[in-house]
Image (cartoon, rainbow, N blue to C red):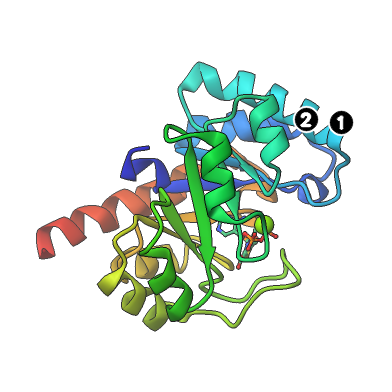
Amino acid sequence: MNREDLNLYLVTDKELANGKALEDIVEEAVKGGVSMVQIREKEANSKDFYQLARTVKKVLEKYKVPLIINDRLDIALAVDAEGLHIGQSDLPYDVARKILGPNKIIGLSVENIEQAKQANQLDVDYIGLSPVFSTQTKNDIAKPLELDGVKEIMSFSKHPAVAIGGINSANTADIIKAGADGIAVVSAIVCAKDPCNAAKELKEIINKSLSLKAIDS
Ligand SMILES: Cc1ncc(COP(=O)(O)OP(=O)(O)O)c(N)n1
Ligand SMILES: Cc1nc(C(=O)O)sc1CCOP(=O)(O)O
Ligand SMILES: [Mg+2]
């Protein structure tokens, strides 16, 4: 995985797609600059999840954008996804790595400083800073890290990191400035009238913020 793959990370939620085909939203978003896609479908049964993942994988292959599966190691294996995202209550990292092997991407959510320190002991490919702000999209979120939490974790984490939760065009620049490598969004793209334009707008802010960070360092 390249660090840049985390710049603009789309996480799906079919429930929020307003009847639009998720694969169409994904393709439009990728055209607008999305660099990684996670299929996260909490309500889908195994068959629907698998079929959606296969369909989205075909789209992403055209653009060489990595596909990550949320929670479900079996689906990641079944569709030969590029990776798996796990949280603190999901399958343990070591088990996932043993089964997926060294070449797949594994992302791990960290919800506080202690978990970020523990993640430094693991060879995860990236961490998800969960959540940076509060959000309506997920019910069971931890206490938001806010920008200070992002700054603190990025001061010692050895892993690339993507922030998630309540992110939109108004707060993206601050998150990149705080040290994250990128942002992961659901509603800012899935609920947008024009997912391509929504992604473009976010990507421009990210690129600008990353250039400013490079000049400062
Ligand atoms: C990029 C990214 N970061 C964090 C999460 C949250 O994962 P988790 O804590 O396992 O919660 P669920 O998404 O499974 O509800 C994520 N999915 N992606
Ligand atoms: C999938 C997910 N995980 C979170 C976490 O904190 O672990 S917050 C979240 C949903 C993010 O949606 P939105 O971009 O619409 O706020
Ligand atoms: Mg999970």
Q: Indicate if the residue with disc 1 has its beta carbon within 8 Å of ligand 1.
A: no
Q: Quadrant of the N terminus?
A: top left
Q: Residue at x 76, y 46 (%)?
A: 41
- Which amino acid type corresponds to the residue marked 1 in the rendered image? Lys
Residue 65 appearing in the image: yes
Measured in 3D between alpha carbons, the distance from the residue under mark 1 to the one under mark 2, in whole angstroms, is 5 Å
Splitting the image into 4 quarters, where does residue 193 fall? top right
Side (left or right) of 136 relative to 162: right
Q: Residue at x 65, y 49 (%)?
A: 192
**Mark 1 lies on residue:** 47
Q: Secondary structure at mark 1?
A: helix
Nearer the observer, 148 or 205 = 148
- Residue 207 x/y as whole percent: 30, 49
**Mark 2 lies on residue:** 50
The correct choice, above or below, for 211 with respect to 112 in the image is above
Nearer the observer, 186 or 171 = 186
- Residue 5 x/y as whole percent: 39, 40
Q: Residues within 10 Å of mark 1 (few under 14, many from 20)?
A: few
Residue 198 appearing in the image: no
Count of labels in the image = 2
Splitting the image into 4 quarters, where does residue 210 fall? bottom left
Splitting the image into 4 quarters, where does residue 161 fall? bottom left
Q: Secondary structure at mark 2?
A: helix
